[in-house]
Amino acid sequence: MPSDETLVTCRDAALTFGRGSQAVVAVHGANLKIRAGDRLAVVGPSGSGKSSLLHLLAGLEQPTSGEVIRPEPLGTYDIGLVFQGDSLIPALNVLENAALPLVLAGRTEPEAQEAARAALGLVGAADLVDRLPEEISGGQAQRAAAARVLAQGPRLILADEPTGRLDHATATRLLDALLTAADRTGAALVVTTHDPAVAARLTVQHSMREGRLLESEKTS
Ligand code: ADP
Ligand code: MG
């Protein structure tokens, strides 16, 4: 369900960590427009700035220069970021983790858990509902974290190397789940990866090298 609705626009958006001689430019002026229904892969080696770019898109980091613009109606739960590292809350089981954003957004516990169960099923993690994060593998945690985002039904799904800790079969299944969820809701999907085979599953591929987003369109 592609539409012309723009969800995020980066205009010469840059992100620098530290100051002076310690400064690291993680993202050089990036120009990018993400519309509803887009399927974008950002491909680059470790340290090229992929996570930093996603954090800018998500609003977790503010650009050091340039702009990241989102339309006014886009709320916190309209953007879902699947973090690269561990992000599950240790004291909650997988089902409670996946349901938490919906509970925080004001949905009832049964409603939130129903959506969480459906999302866990979609990523092949339905059998993990009762487990604590310490009782599951890194790859299972990655799938649970993806389910937590999908359960929210965000309009922009940002997935940071979501297949990094998965074998080929589970990686394929997780990508299927992300694409299916995005197709169902008309959401935009942005996936970072260092794996060209993963990138090939998305419609458009941009590469990142040393903080520079290549093939990025100039937005006015
Ligand atoms: P990637 O996700 O492609 O591996 P990152 O966006 O994590 O790349 O990192 C890009 C660059 O920014 C790297 O040089 C990294 O060391 C640096 N960097 C990332 N986060 C921070 C931070 N919080 N403080 C200082 N430097 C950082
Ligand atoms: Mg990263």
Image (spheres, rainbow, N blue to C red):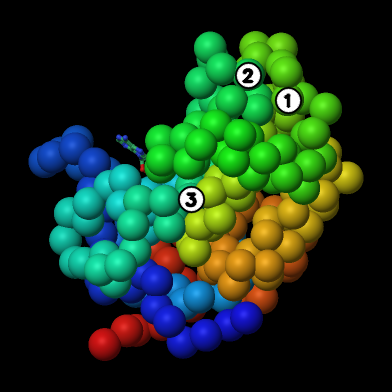
Using the rendered image of the protein, determine whether residue 28 is visible from the camera's viewpoint: yes
Give neighbour class at mark 1: few <14, some 14-19, many 20+ (Cα, 10 Å).
some
Q: Which residue is mark 2?
A: 93
Nearest the viewer among 58 and 206 is 58
Q: Nearer the viewer, mark 3 or mark 2?
A: 2
Q: Which mark is residue 73?
A: none
Residue placed under numbered mark 1 in the picture:
129
Quadrant holding the C terminus: bottom left
The CA distance from mark 1 to mark 2 is 7 Å
Determine whether label 1 and label 2 are within 8 Å by CB: yes
Specify whether tag 1 is near ligand 2 (CB below 8 Å). no
Task: Give the number of the mark in front: 1 or 3.
Answer: 1
Badge number at residue 80: 3
Q: Amino acid at mark 3?
A: Gly
**Are the residues at dot 1 and dot 3 in contact (C-beta closer than 8 Å)?**
no
Q: Earlier in the sequence, mark 3 or mark 2?
A: 3
- Tell me the SS state at disc 1: loop
The image position of residue 51, as x and y in percent, is 45, 47
Q: Position of residue 100 (x, y in %)?
A: 50, 32
**Residue 163 appears in view:** no
Taking the spot 22% from the left edge, 56% from the top edge, the residue there is: 63
Q: Who is closer to the viewer here, 13 or 36?
A: 36
- Nearer the observer, 193 or 155: 155
Name the quarter where the N terminus is drawn.
bottom right
Position of residue 136 measured from the top left corner of the image (x, y, whole percent): 73, 18
Measuring from the top left, give residue 94's x and y in whole percent. 65, 25
